[in-house]
Image: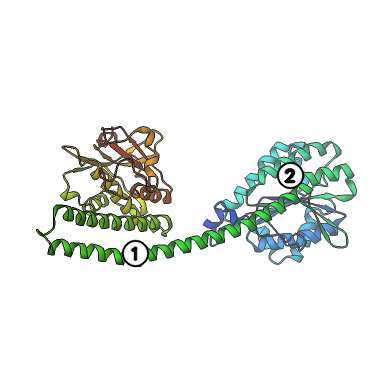
Amino acid sequence: MGSVPTGPAAQAPDGAADARREPGPLERVGQDLGIPALGEAPWGSHFCQFFGGRQDLLDFLVPFYRTGLERNEACLLTTTDPLDVDDAVEVLSREIDGFGAAVDRGQMVVVSAQARYLAGGSFDPERILELVPAGVEEALRRGYSGRRACTNENWMQQADWDPMMTLEGRLSRTLSGRRSISMCAYPLPKCDAGQLLDVLMRHQFALIRHDDWTLIEPSERKRATEAVERMNVALAQRTAELQSALADLRGFSRWVTHDLRAPLASITSFGEMLAHSSAGRLSDDEAGMLERMRNGAARMERLITDILTYSTAQHADLQIRALDLRSMVAEAWSAVGGENARASLRVYDLPLARGDAALVRQALIALLDNAIRFSAGRPDPLVEAGARTLPDGELAYYVRDNGVGFERADADALFGAFTRLHSVTSSEGAGLGLAIVKEVFARHGGRVWAEGEPGLGATFFFTLPTPAGAGQIPRQNRRGDR
């Protein structure tokens, strides 16, 4: 007999979209196999069972497939003597509620080993190697959470042994990381010691029945499992330490906001009052000292603001939405006092992007402020904002100035925290502006880089996710390229 009729295609259940996606690292654990001795195993597991007879097989297959059907997994049983297709369907239908309905909708498929492995009259390992991953992808496409499969290898002749062992080794690599649980059942009475070792070395672990189920792990597998467990403990400890450090950092930010700003506000306020009340009565040296005090307080206020902005850029939850960068550039220009600066602003094509509006606005403010400050010494300072399509098709936005520029060797250093390539007297700032820019776009999965030459200005490029259809700039509109 061949396959049990599959019936109409299964309908994708609720949550099918989530079932189709590739699992994250933490989802690769905890797939219940239905066997107490095995407990749970990760997706991609490829293990084996040594069975003594028909009852050994059934004692494994019933809980194995009952659990798979309950977990919305596609199930495949490839079987032969001592449990043929008709026998398997009859027993499993009796022991598993809903088994017949699962067969009818195609969630459960039972096929003879000869039909699957000897199609065309001979064993073709390459064909099987293509069928297995294709079956997993088909299960996901139809909305199942994964696939579990069991194959009774009692169909083999002696000449098939070496090709099968080669196939088993390749299947372990093919199934790794896929949403698949695969078990191969070998008849214990037909395997000599060398063959038992062959099978063990090509599977992650083995199950054998004495009075109860016994789990056998190859020594390398066991050592690897123990190493992973040690790494998980270390990772959990490191995660706890990072969470504690993050809580400390947030506490520091609150302290900076309130306790550090309060005395600074007093210094600034009293300094202004003193400057006003003593106008014309201070010597030039005294007036100079007062002015330096007020400038120092202003720089300290800016440093505190930049530190808080930098912390927010690193840790704030992202609220992603469509962004009109043209209007955001205009808002940022106003925020940095661009209307009162001598610099002119030219805005070219700026396609829509996607991102967190508050963080991207802070990055634009930092870029425009940087451009205004470093072009202030030019007779005709100019700041430009636009976008261009890179040779690989990626869309990059930019802010450009015609200011002092920088050496090419310093391009990467520009984005370091508290890094200045120019003196404080030639350029105010805490040295955090471009570090904030880098953090913001990194949080969005983008990147930032700079190009420039001494005396010829600088261009700062950045990338952001874009809505569909917003990724190309018509060449005739790329007036900002150079």
Q: CA distance from mark 1 to mark 2?
A: 74 Å
Q: At 68% across and 43% down in the image, what residue appears?
A: 173
| Mark 1 vs 2: CB contact within 8 A | no
Q: At 25% across and 63% down in the image, what residue appears?
A: 267
Q: Report which residue position mark 2 lands on.
A: 116
Give the total number of marks visible in the rendering.
Answer: 2
14 or 430, which lies in front? 430
Q: At 20% across and 62% down in the image, what residue appears?
A: 271
Colour setting: rainbow
Q: At 82% across and 60% down in the image, what residue appears?
A: 213
Q: Report which residue position mark 1 lands on.
A: 260
- Quadrant position of residue 250: bottom left
157 or 5, which lies in front? 157
341 or 298, which lies in front? 298
Q: Which mark is in front, 1 or 2? A: 1
Q: Is residue 113 left or right of residue 345?
A: right
- Quadrant position of residue 294: bottom left
Residue 430 position within the rendered picture, expressed as x and y whole percent measured from the top left: 32, 50
Amino acid at the residue labelled 2: Arg
Report helix, strand or loop for mark 1.
Answer: helix
Q: Which quarter of the image is occupied by the C terminus? A: top left
Amino acid at the residue labelled 1: Leu
Query: Which of the marked residues, 1 or 2, is nearer the chain's N terminus?
Result: 2
Report helix, strand or loop for mark 2.
Answer: helix
Q: Is residue 435 above or below residue 280?
A: above
Visible residue check, residue 348: no
Visible residue check, residue 268: yes
Q: Is residue 379 left or right of residue 393?
A: left
Density class for disc 1 (Cα within 10 Å; few <14, some 14-19, many ≥20) is some
Residue 40 position within the rendered picture, expressed as x and y whole percent measured from the top left: 70, 60
